[in-house]
Amino acid sequence: MHIGSQYSNNTCNFTLWAPLVGEVAVHLVEPQDKVVPLEKDERGYWRGSIADIKPGSLYYYQLDGEKDAADPAAHSQPQGVHGASEVIDHDSFKWNDDKWQGVPLEEMVIYELHVGTFTEAGTFEGIIPRLADLKELGVNTIEIMPVAQFPGSRNWGYDGVFPYAVQNSYGSVDGLKKLVDACHQQGISVILDVVYNHLGPEGNYLWGYGTYFTEKYKTPWGSAINFDDSYSDGVRNYFVQNVLYWLENYHLDGLRLDAVHAIYDFGAKHILAEMAEAVTQLEQKKNRQFYLIAESDLNDPRIIRSQEVGGYGIDAQWSDDFHHALHTVLTGEKNGYYEDFGSLEQLAKIYRQGFVYTWDYSPHRHRYHGDDPKGCASSQFVVCAQNHDQVGNRMLGDRLSNLISFEALKLTAAALLLSPYIPMLFMGEEYGETAPFLYFVSHGDRDLIEAVRKGRKEEFAAFHEIDGKEAPDPQAEETFKESQLNWDKRKTGEHEKLWLFHQKLLQMRKNVPALRNLDRNQLGSSVIEPEQVLCIKRHHQNSQIVCWLNFGSEAVKITDDNKSGTWKKILDSSEETWGGTGSQMPEKLDGSSSSELMINPYSVVVYSNQ
C-alpha cells in the first residue's frame, strides 16, 4: 500500500493513513492555493488525485477542515520540519547503474560516515570526490548515518521526524541519488542507516494522528512506535513501505536498522520479519540482492536466522561484543557496559562464536544474556573497533587515536580486519583522525535545546568532577565543526603509515584465501598467558595463516608449534615499513628454525603457508 505523494505524468496521487481523522484534504500552497478533498476507505486510508500538477509543488494535508500538517510520508521538506511538503518526480533522475548488482555481503568492507562532517562541504555531492580514496584503501561499501529530515542543519540523524524525506541541508533528493549513482560507478555499494524505533521530538507531527505511538512500551527516547497495539496495521505498512521506498527510489543496496532492541512487537509476525519478506519480494522483482543489517544489543540469533527455523530473516547484525571486548583489552576501561569485558579470552571466544555472551551471566546486567549463534554464517556479523556511538557518546568524542598508541592502533586494525566477520571502519579511523566526533544538534525549540544541554551535563557529571572538563555545547556550531575530518592528515607521518597499513590488511583479506573465506569453523583462537598474546589460525583449502597479536606492553617470547611446511611472513607491524622500530621475528618459519620467537609489544605478525 503506497502512501504519500506518487507523481507521474503531470498527475499526483495522494494517500494518507489517518483512521481517526474525520476529514482530509490536500492543501496546495505553491504555486497556487487550492484545496482538494480526499476520500476515506474502510481501512482508514484517504486517497485522491490532482491533475496538471508540477514537481516542486508544495502542499499540506488539511485535517478536519482547519489544521494544516505536513505529509508524514513527504519525500522532501525544502522548508524544514515545520514547512510544507514537496511533490517529487522520482522518474526524472537519469541513473547510470543499470548493470549494477551490488557487492555480495560476504565481500563487504563497510565504511561508516556522517554526511555533515565527512567533508567541509557537508553534502552528498561533497562525498563524491572522496570515493576514489576509499576505493584505493579497499573499501567497497559506505554506510551513511541517517539522512531522514531532522530539525536544523546539524544532527547525527537519529532525531529525524520525516522518515521518507531526504535532509535538505545535505542536498535533498537529487543529491542523495547523485551520490549513490557515483558510488555504483566506482563499484561501491551504499547502505543507509534508518531509524524505526523512535522519531525525534521537534517537528514530530505524527503524534497528532493518534495511532503511530503506543504507551504500552517505553524506549530510551520516550513512547514506542506502535507495531502491535490497536491501529497498528497502518503503522506497520508505513515502515515496511519505507524500507522499499529507499531501496527502489534511491537504488540503495541495503539498510542498517537502528537499535532493533527498541522495536517492540509481540505479534505473531514480528515487524522485522515482515520487512524481510517485503525485501525478498523486491529482490525477485529486481533480480538482485538487497541487505537488511540490524543493530541489536540482544545477542539474539533469531534476528538473523531464517524464517523457516523461527527467525526474522534479517541478513546480518552488528556484534557489539566484538567492539567491547577489543576496546577493553586495548584501553583497560571498565565503566558502564565495559564492566562485562576486559579478558583477552573473551576476544578469542568471539572469533570462534560471534558473541561473547551466549547465555552467560552478565555482571553489568545482573542476569544471563545472549544465545549461541550456531548455524549462523560468519558473514552475518558486522564488527568494528569504533563507530559513531562508541566515539560520539564519550563526553569529549575521543577516538581510539586519542586513547592508545600508534602501535596499538595498528594492532587494532589487524584485530578487526583479520577477523572472519564483515569489518566496518568509522570515517577517519583508517589514518588515525584525531578530531573528535562530538554530539551535535541545531534544534529550533529553545526549551528542547536547554533540555539537551542539561541532559549532556548530567550524563557526564561524574567525569566533570574527576577531570574538571564539561561536555561541549551540542547546539554550538563550533561543536559540529570540531567534528569534521582533517583529510590532509592521511598523507603525513604516522597517519600515512596507518592508512597504508589498513590498505595492506584489506589487500590480504581479499587475496589470501584463508582470510577471504569467512567461515569461523575454519578458525582456531587461543590466548598465550600470561604474555597476553592472542593466536589466531585460519585455513581454507590449501591456504593457511597463523597470526600472533601481542596486547601486552612488553616484548615477550612465544613458542611456534607449526612444524609442518614453510611459513612465510606476510605482515609485521613492527617493521620500519609500517613506522615500527624493527622486528625480531624471522622472515620464515619451518621445522629447522628456533621454536622460540620474540614478539614486540602491541604488535601483530602474520605468517602464511600456501
Image: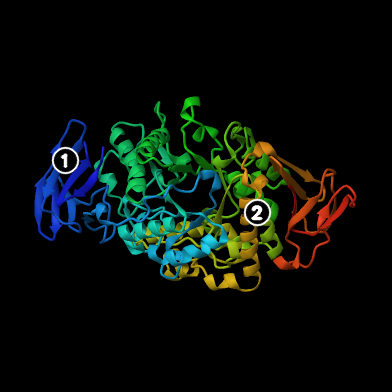
Q: Look at label 2 and name its amino acid.
A: Met
Q: Note whether 250 is above or below 264 in the view shown.
A: below
Residue 334 visible in rendering: no
Residue 193, compared with residue 486, is above or below; it is above
Q: Is residue 277 left or right of residue 16?
A: right
Label 1 environment density (alpha carbons within 10 Å; few <14, some 14–19, many ≥20): many
Where residue 206 appears, x then y in whole percent? 28, 46
Q: Residue 584 or 445: which is nearer the viewer?
A: 584
Q: Which mark is residue 118?
A: none
Mark 1–mark 2 CB contact (< 8 Å): no
Q: CA distance from mark 1 to mark 2?
A: 56 Å
- Earlier residue among tags 1 and 2: 1
Residue 571: x %, y % from top left? 72, 57
Give the colour scheme of this rendering: rainbow
* Residue type of the residue flagged with mark 1: Arg
Q: Position of residue 474 (x, y in %)?
A: 45, 63
Q: Quadrant of residue 127?
A: bottom left
Secondary-structure class at tag 1: strand
The residue pinned by badge 1 equals 47
Whether residue 198 is visible to the viewer of this picture, yes or no, is: yes
SS label for mark 2: helix
Which residue appears at 36% of the width and 51% of the height? 98
Q: Is residue 143 left or right of residue 548?
A: left
Q: Looking at the image, is 468 positioned above or below residue 267? A: below
Of 18 and 419, nearer the camera is: 419
At 46% from the left and 70% from the top, the residue drawn is 481
User: Which dot, 1 or 2, sits closer to the camera?
Assistant: 2
Classed neighbour count for the residue bearing mark 2: other residues with Cα under 10 Å, few (<14), some (14–19), many (≥20): some
Tell me where residue 215 appears, x and y as whole percent.
36, 37
State the mark number for residue 508: 2
Q: Quadrant of the N terminus?
A: top left
